[in-house]
Image: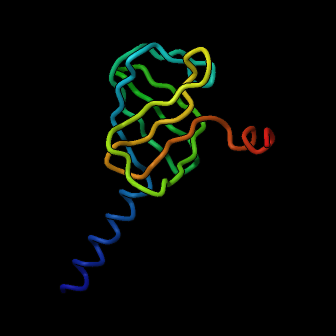
């Protein structure tokens, strides 16, 4: 009986880990993959197929993303931009997770 409970908990843990979500505050209007985001609080859900759904209220945007793991945890959430307010990555506070936006094939082609 105890083994069945442990297996069930482990299975639920794996299912939960397959899609991650984070809360992020954008302090300025931003652009991601050509789509505009107004300043405000957002939920970012990372799906298994290397896409992120960024949601604020009823509005949502789906964009390519890949995750990277840093050597150490970030003390707070940091939003990184390129020129012209283009959202490049989010470093999730309290974790070692970086969400890097954009197509992975475009990144590889630029190398």
Q: Is residue 30 left or right of residue 75?
A: right
Q: Residue at x 50, y 54 (%)?
A: 69
Q: Residue at x 39, y 22 (%)?
A: 26
Instruction: Classify 49 as above or below 26.
Output: below
In front: 14, or 40? 40
Instruction: Classify 99 as above or below 41.
Output: below
Q: In this view, does 36 lie to the left or right of 54?
A: right
Q: Spot the residue most to the left.
A: 1
Instruction: Classify 69 as above or below 46.
Output: below
What is the number of callouts on the image?
0
In front: 92, or 41? 92
Q: Which residue is drawn at 58% across and 21% down?
A: 86
> Where's residue 83, x and y in %?
62, 19
Q: Which residue is drawn at 37% across and 20% down?
A: 58
Q: Quadrant of residue 3?
A: bottom left
Q: In this view, does 7 lie to the left or right of 47?
A: left
| Colour convention | rainbow
> Where's residue 48, x and y in %?
53, 51
Give the position of the C terminus as an image quadrant: top right
Give the position of the N terminus as an image quadrant: bottom left
> Where's residue 29, x and y in %?
46, 13
> Where's residue 15, x and y in %?
39, 60
């Amino acid at each position: 009986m105890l083994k069945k409970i442990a297996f069930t908990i482990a299975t639920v843990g794996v299912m939960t880990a397959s899609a991650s979500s984070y809360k992020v505050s954008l302090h300025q209007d931003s652009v991601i993959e050509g789509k505009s985001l107004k300043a405000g609080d957002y939920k970012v859900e990372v799906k298994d197929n290397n896409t992120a759904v960024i949601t604020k209220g009823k509005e949502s945007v789906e964009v390519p993303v890949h995750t990277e793991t840093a050597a150490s945890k970030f003390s707070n959430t940091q939003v990184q931009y390129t020129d012209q307010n283009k959202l490049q990555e989010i470093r999730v506070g309290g974790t070692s997770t970086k969400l890097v936006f954009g197509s992975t094939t475009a990144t590889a082609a630029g190398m």
